[in-house]
């Protein structure tokens, strides 16, 4: 079937925007095609520094014909209503039919819209998408009003091998593009993606970002291996560099060995940040090498000697700066830097970094006591945790905050636990980030994140929708990971209160943590409804116990007893809800044993009373599996009750007593979870 090929050729697109732009182009075009009634078999989108490319395969030659019957106003309706209906249908009054029904006579429109040729539709869709394309930043150029990420030079657009003609701000669509800016700048024509990609490859352009990434990675590893070195892999840098070149050429440069006196993380960050280069390490020792990998966008006639020399010169200057900061920073003690934090505003409504450090220090002592760490060490680590923010190195490379603090603390002879905690207190900063290596670090990391959360909650700066400018969701997920992966039993409400949260904010924060826990556990395969069922119970402040309860509940519901009991409990709850609403009262009082006249209701009452007592004891002992085993014993009595006993008996006293018995079932299961919130 025919294929749509589209290329938007421009000046350099920032690497960070390319992947999303390609995906946006694919989504916007295919959505518009489907909305018009055109289905397709597949779509692929690509980006290089100078072009966005889309191929949509398996499109029909035209949109399908549409036949629609639409009922209009009554024949005796006001003239304005009738004219409005005619306008919406595009018909005239004599083209309408009249239909009789019980309500009288109404106009009926039979609308037939003939399908449109696909090229005609594409010629309408593409200019509209270009006009409203969601670039994070865009620009105007020349005298025109069109906006694009960088000046747009040409548009290639073909369908089934033929050019789709349209005009965008004076740019006429065609079937021409250009190859590599320097190595193959001549015009190239293409009509289908397969030929387009092959022609560009011959013109020194790799259209697929994945191909450029793989080329860089393989050639870098090969070049390093030949020197007895290993590549320090960096996925984010690899993607960025692949977005800077259309024809990657991997080269190796070097810098003076004397710079290796600077911490390796500083060197790696410096050459990555300033020159987009990859670090190398000695394969035998694991130590950082004075060689590095750079990626050019051209095959140079001199084999890349001038490119390497230029990079070496720039990197030498950057590393000289880094060495200067390293030497100067160590001349000033961390303690001497603390007063400077009082001059740095953390947030206009939350005070300075100095004030925040004091709060974290106090909270760190409390957390340390709760998790079995040394409170004095935790407090000390918290006091110095932000001191490196006013160092020259962190001023130059903010991403090294915490890490440089550890280096400076170690140089001053501070306790290893304190130094490690200074480095680790930001951890974890994402799902793939590691945790602090010591309990001291865990205490400070928890205190740091809880202070952030309670602080922003107190000024009503909570995440809304997709907006989370202060990364509060990430902070909460960090707390969740610290607690669960370190198996810490902590009362969150107590911690929120110690951090200064009001009772209302503490409750709201606990609800926020319930949502973050769902996100975390969902990735582990847990069911969100089970988390809801457990969090619905009062006093669920301990995330570790919540998860243990959820896991036990999940295992129970995977058994026949669990599934059948769930059905019985839901049946009991539904009956209760209906009858309580009808009667305008609840049935929470004790069951009258004298009114239990059938064997099945007597058996159920005994079983429920026993189960409730045993389940509560098991819960108090944190034996959630044991509590579920107790609940399993209710399955047969519940089944027997519903098989033999009529709840809504004719005698009002029997009916009331049996509703109270159903409430006892609900109370018993509420000891472990709110079964009404469980799906299924």
Image (tube, rainbow, N blue to C red):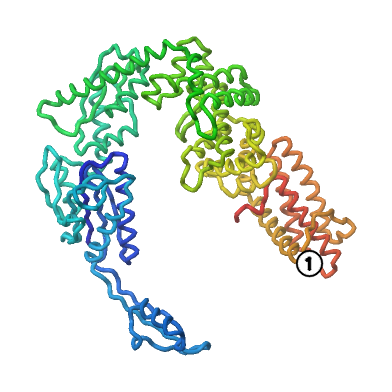
Q: Is residue 120 above or below residue 464?
A: below
Front in this rendered view, residue 94 or 524: 94
Give the residue drawn at x 12%, y 37%.
182
The picture places residue 268, in percent across and down from the top left corner, at: 33, 23
The residue where tag 1 is placed is: 648
Crowd rating for badge 1 (residues with CA inside 10 Å; few <14, some 14–19, many 20+) = some
The picture places residue 441, in percent across and down from the top left corner, at: 54, 23
Front in this rendered view, residue 299 or 382: 382
| Quadrant (top left/top right/bottom left/bottom right) for the C terminus | bottom right
The residue lying furthest to the right in this view is 594
Determine the image quadrant of residue 397. Answer: top left
| Quadrant (top left/top right/bottom left/bottom right) for the N terminus | bottom left
Tell me how many marks there are: 1
Q: 152 left or right of 369?
A: left
Front in this rendered view, residue 532 or 350: 350
Q: Is residue 267 above or below residue 154?
A: above
Front in this rendered view, residue 119 or 147: 147
Q: 30 left or right of 427?
A: left
Q: 590 left or right of 194?
A: right
Q: Element type at marker 1?
A: loop
The picture places residue 506, in percent across and down from the top left corner, at: 64, 39
Determine the image quadrant of residue 92. Answer: bottom left
The picture places residue 245, in percent across and down from the top left corner, at: 22, 37
Q: Is residue 149 above or below residue 308?
A: below
Q: 644 left or right of 408?
A: right
């Amino acid at each position: 079937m025919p294929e749509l090929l589209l290329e938007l050729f421009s000046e350099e697109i920032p690497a960070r925007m390319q992947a999303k732009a390609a995906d946006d182009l694919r989504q916007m075009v295919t959505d518009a095609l489907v909305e018009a009634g055109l289905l397709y078999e597949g779509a692929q989108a690509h980006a290089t520094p100078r072009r966005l490319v889309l191929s949509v395969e398996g499109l029909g030659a035209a949109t399908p014909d549409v036949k629609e019957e639409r009922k209009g106003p009554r024949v005796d309706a006001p003239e304005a209503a009738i004219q409005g209906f005619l306008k919406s249908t595009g018909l005239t009054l004599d083209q309408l039919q009249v239909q009789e029904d019980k309500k009288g006579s109404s106009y009926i429109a039979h609308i037939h819209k003939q399908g449109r040729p696909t090229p005609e539709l594409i010629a309408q869709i593409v200019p509209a998408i270009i006009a409203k394309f969601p670039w994070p930043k865009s620009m105007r150029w020349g005298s025109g009003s069109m906006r694009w990420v960088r000046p747009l030079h040409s548009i290639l657009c073909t369908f089934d091998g033929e050019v789709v003609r349209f005009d965008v701000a004076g740019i006429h669509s065609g079937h021409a593009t250009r190859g590599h800016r320097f190595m193959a700048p001549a015009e190239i024509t293409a009509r289908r993606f397969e030929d387009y990609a092959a022609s560009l490859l011959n013109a020194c352009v790799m259209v697929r970002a994945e191909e450029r990434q793989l080329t860089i990675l393989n050639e870098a590893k090969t070049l390093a291996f030949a020197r007895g070195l290993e590549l320090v892999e960096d996925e984010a840098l690899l993607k960025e560099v692949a977005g800077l070149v259309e024809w990657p050429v991997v080269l190796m440069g070097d810098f003076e060995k004397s710079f290796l006196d600077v911490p390796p993380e500083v060197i790696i960050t410096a050459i990555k940040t300033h020159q987009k280069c990859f670090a190398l390490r000695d394969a035998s020792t694991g130590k950082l090498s004075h060689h590095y990998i750079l990626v050019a966008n051209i095959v140079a006639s001199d084999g890349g000697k001038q490119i390497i020399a230029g990079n070496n010169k720039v990197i030498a200057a950057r590393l000289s700066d880094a060495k200067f900061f390293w030497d100067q920073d160590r001349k000033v003690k961390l303690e001497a830097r603390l007063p400077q934090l009082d001059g740095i505003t953390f947030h206009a409504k939350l005070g300075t970094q100095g004030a925040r450090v004091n709060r974290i220090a106090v909270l760190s002592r409390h957390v340390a006591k709760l998790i079995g760490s040394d409170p004095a060490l935790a407090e000390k680590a918290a006091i110095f945790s932000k001191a490196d923010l006013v160092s020259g190195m962190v001023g130059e490379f903010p991403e090294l905050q915490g890490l440089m603090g550890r280096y400076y603390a170690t140089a001053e002879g501070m306790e290893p636990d304190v130094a490690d905690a200074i480095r680790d207190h930001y951890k974890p900063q994402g799902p793939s980030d590691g945790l602090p290596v010591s309990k001291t670090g865990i205490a400070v990391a928890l205190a740091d994140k809880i202070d952030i959360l309670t602080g922003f909650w107190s000024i009503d700066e909570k995440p809304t929708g997709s907006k989370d400018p202060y990364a509060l969701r990430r902070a909460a997920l960090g707390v969740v990971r610290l607690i669960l992966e370190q198996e810490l039993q902590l009362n969150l409400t107590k911690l929120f209160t110690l951090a200064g949260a009001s009772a209302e904010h503490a409750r709201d924060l606990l609800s926020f943590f319930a949502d973050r826990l769902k996100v975390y556990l969902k990735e582990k395969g847990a069911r969100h409804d089970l988390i809801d069922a457990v969090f619905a119970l009062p006093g669920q402040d301990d995330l570790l116990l919540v998860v243990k309860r959820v896991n036990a509940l999940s295992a129970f519901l995977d058994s026949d007893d669990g599934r059948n009991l769930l059905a019985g409990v839901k049946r009991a709850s539904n009956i209760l809800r209906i009858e309580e609403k009808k009667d305008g009262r609840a049935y929470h009082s004790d069951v009258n044993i004298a009114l239990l006249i059938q064997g099945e209701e007597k058996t159920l009452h005994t079983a429920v009373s026993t189960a409730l007592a045993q389940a509560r004891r098991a819960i108090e002992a944190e034996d959630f599996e044991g509590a579920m085993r107790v609940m399993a014993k209710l399955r047969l009595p519940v089944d027997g009750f519903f098989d033999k006993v009529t709840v809504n008996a004719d005698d009002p006293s029997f009916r009331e007593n049996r509703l109270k018995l159903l409430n006892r079932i609900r109370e018993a299961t509420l000891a472990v979870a709110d079964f009404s919130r469980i799906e299924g």
